Image: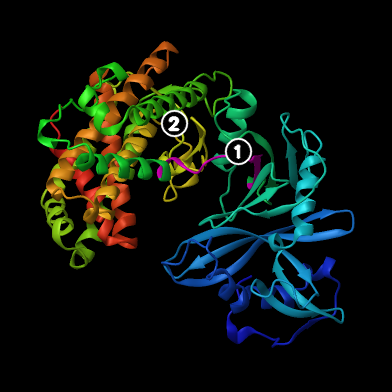
């Protein structure tokens, strides 16, 4: 029920002669709540994804009670409509508090209910709500058929609620740490389907026993009026860790580049390797080991093994059709080309419209990108499914170093939601597992170039020399990863194609990923656009 300002019949201070348990049925309250009050609140939230568009109005698509005995909260499914003629859906749990000292920064609406003054707030700010949600999951019954479905994993071994706290700053979701043992992730942006993070986490944990992802512990799903199952929360184990693999890689790379001077490495004398070669540790020349250190290559082997084990688990299902492997076909080719050509045109438009924001190497590469657009487009069109013999499976879909936690000498893979720009349906399309590998390779490339650009003044070598060293290191990273990954995949009979097919898919997916990255960088931090542009041109210029 959209509402314009001129239709308002109530003005502050807002008073309603009803009880909290019936407030959501009061049309006047809903009209006030969905007006500028909620609009102003939502656009200021970190999890709101519509900041680049103009909000038109908000509709309350649906609501439901989240309760335990007499303790009642409301879960709201909001449809945010934009002037540009599209919409997004969000989940917002609300609570009523009367304590004036509480949640001063997080109040949505001051009001009086049945003579009691107070505030509507986001319920996640209330410990009582967090406790209730945990207890509802902990006491969930099997095969729940109610509207709000709480699920407890067979792996759950929880005890009574002790404490909870916010996990930290997040962009699109809100995570709560419970008892320093579990994490409940509340999905803010929601879709008319089960969230892939929930599906993948539950499948890998419960069905396949994959140990290197946070164990699935429980969830909350809502069945809407169209009988669609919508995931609003996912509970997993809290994995003790030393940070993510992105931060680890940046720290290691600073040492590696500092070693160029410290160890008096002659970059031009370093031995080269062909890209995508499969390398064991013994295949890496002593000069490279001396420069970069053995430990980083050993870590890459472990990461490759965990990545392969994830794909083996995802590719070993033969009863659940959502996860059974399949082959390439014409429908997939049409879907892929339409999606990528649309995305590529979007990036061309962004670069053309923002080229004035670039300078130096970024500007030079952007001009080359525009000049060679037909050549790049042709690479996307050059996808012939009849020549590909490998399998497609459900994959991570947004696999990069930031999605991986380090625990001692091991890695934990997380966040299976998929690419933020993709539709929920596209995120569930079965893809070649090498698309995830391409994502991690792009992440290696990013980390190397981010180190060169961020710390340019820290190294005496010229940028050109640092680029040469970086490209060399990048090839050895890829080679060592491929050596471990491909060997384990083939040993477990997951078909990723023969050598030329693997190289074609890797280059294709790396080009796709670099083009995808270009949009983010051009919009958010143009100085970094040089990294995906460098990636695009290196793939186009590569002779394999």
Image-based side of 363 in relation to 158, left or right? left
Residue 245 within the segment the image draws in magenta: yes
User: Residue 372: which disc?
Assistant: none
Q: Is residue 304 above or below residue 125?
A: above
Image-based side of 212 in relation to 145, left or right? left
Of residues 534 and 343, the one drawn nearer to the viewer in this rendering: 534
Of residues 74 and 224, the one drawn nearer to the viewer in this rendering: 74
User: Which stretch is magenta?
Assistant: 231-246
Which of the 4 quarters of the picture holds residue 431? top left
Q: Mark 1 packing: few (<14 Cα in 10 Å), some, or many (20+)?
A: some
Image-based side of 299 in relation to 354, left or right? right
Residue 15 in the image: state x and y as whole percent: 79, 83
Of residues 515 and 216, the one drawn nearer to the viewer in this rendering: 216
User: Residue 430: which disc?
Assistant: 2
Q: Is residue 83 above or below residue 385?
A: below
Which of the 4 quarters of the picture holds residue 356? bottom left
Q: Mark 2 packing: few (<14 Cα in 10 Å), some, or many (20+)?
A: many
Q: Residue at x 50, y 45 (%)?
A: 424
- The N terminus lies in which quarter of the figure? bottom right
Residue 520 in the image: state x and y as whole percent: 34, 55
Residue 227 in the image: state x and y as whole percent: 67, 45
Q: Is residue 263 above or below residue 344?
A: above
Q: Residue at x 43, y 29 (%)?
A: 303
Image-based side of 96 in relation to 510, left or right? right
Q: Earlier in the sequence, mark 2 or mark 1?
A: 1
Q: Is residue 252 above or below residue 118?
A: above
To which residue does mark 1 refer? 239
Q: Residue furthest right?
A: 70
- Helix, strand or loop for disc 2: loop
- Helix, strand or loop for disc 1: loop
């Amino acid at each position: 029920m959209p509402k314009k300002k001129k239709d308002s019949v109530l003005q502050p201070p807002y008073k309603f002669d009803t009880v909290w348990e019936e407030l959501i049925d009061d049309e006047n309250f809903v009209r006030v709540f969905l007006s500028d009050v909620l609009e102003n609140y939502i656009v200021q939230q970190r999890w709101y994804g519509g900041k680049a568009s103009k909000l038109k109005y908000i509709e309350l698509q649906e609501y439901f009670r989240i309760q335990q005995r007499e303790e009642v909260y409301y879960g709201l499914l909001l449809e945010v409509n934009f002037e540009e003629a599209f919409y997004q859906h969000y989940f917002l749990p609300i609570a009523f508090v009367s304590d004036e000292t509480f949640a001063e920064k997080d109040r949505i609406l001051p009001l009086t209910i049945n003579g009691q003054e107070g505030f509507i707030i986001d319920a996640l700010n209330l410990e009582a709500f967090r406790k209730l949600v945990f207890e509802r999951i902990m006491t969930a019954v099997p095969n729940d058929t109610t509207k709000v479905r709480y699920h407890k994993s067979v792996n759950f071994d929880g005890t009574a609620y002790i404490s909870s706290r916010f996990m930290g700053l997040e962009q699109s979701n809100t995570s709560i740490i419970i008892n320093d043992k579990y994490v409940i992730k509340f999905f803010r942006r929601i879709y008319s389907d089960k969230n892939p993070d929930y599906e993948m986490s539950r499948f890998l944990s419960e069905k396949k026993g994959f140990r290197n992802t946070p164990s699935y512990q429980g969830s909350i799903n809502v069945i809407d009026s169209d009988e669609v199952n919508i995931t609003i929360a996912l509970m997993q184990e809290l994995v003790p860790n030393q940070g993510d693999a992105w931060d680890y890689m940046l720290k290691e790379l600073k040492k590696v580049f500092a070693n160029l001077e410290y160890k008096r490495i002659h970059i031009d004398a370093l031995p080269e390797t062909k890209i995508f070669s499969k390398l064991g540790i013994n295949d890496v020349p002593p000069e490279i080991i001396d420069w970069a250190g053995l430990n980083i290559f050993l870590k890459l082997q472990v990461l490759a093994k965990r990545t392969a084990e994830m794909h083996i688990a995802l590719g070993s299902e033969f009863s659940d059709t959502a996860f059974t492997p399949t082959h390439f076909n014409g429908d997939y080719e049409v879907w892929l080309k339409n999606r990528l050509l649309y995305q590529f045109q979007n990036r061309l438009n962004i670069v053309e419209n923002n080229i004035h924001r670039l300078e130096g190497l970024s500007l030079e590469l952007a001009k080359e990108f525009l000049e060679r657009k037909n050549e790049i487009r042709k690479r996307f069109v050059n996808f012939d499914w009849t020549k590909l013999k490998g399998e497609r499976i459900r994959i991570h879909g947004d696999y990069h170093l930031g999605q991986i936690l380090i625990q001692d000498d091991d890695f934990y893979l997380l966040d299976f939601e998929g690419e933020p720009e993709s539709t929920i349906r596209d995120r569930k399309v079965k893809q070649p597992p090498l698309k995830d590998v391409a994502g991690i390779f792009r992440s290696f490339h990013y980390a190397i170039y981010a180190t060169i650009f961020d710390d340019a003044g820290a190294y005496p070598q010229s940028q050109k020399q640092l680029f040469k060293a970086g490209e060399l290191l990048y090839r050895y990273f890829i080679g060592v990863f491929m050596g471990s990954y491909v060997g384990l995949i083939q040993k477990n009979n997951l078909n990723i194609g023969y050598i030329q097919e693997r190289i074609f898919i890797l280059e294709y997916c790396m080009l796709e990923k670099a083009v995808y990255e270009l949009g983010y960088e051009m919009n958010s931090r143009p100085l970094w656009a040089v990294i995906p542009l460098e990636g695009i041109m290196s793939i186009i210029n590569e002779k394999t």
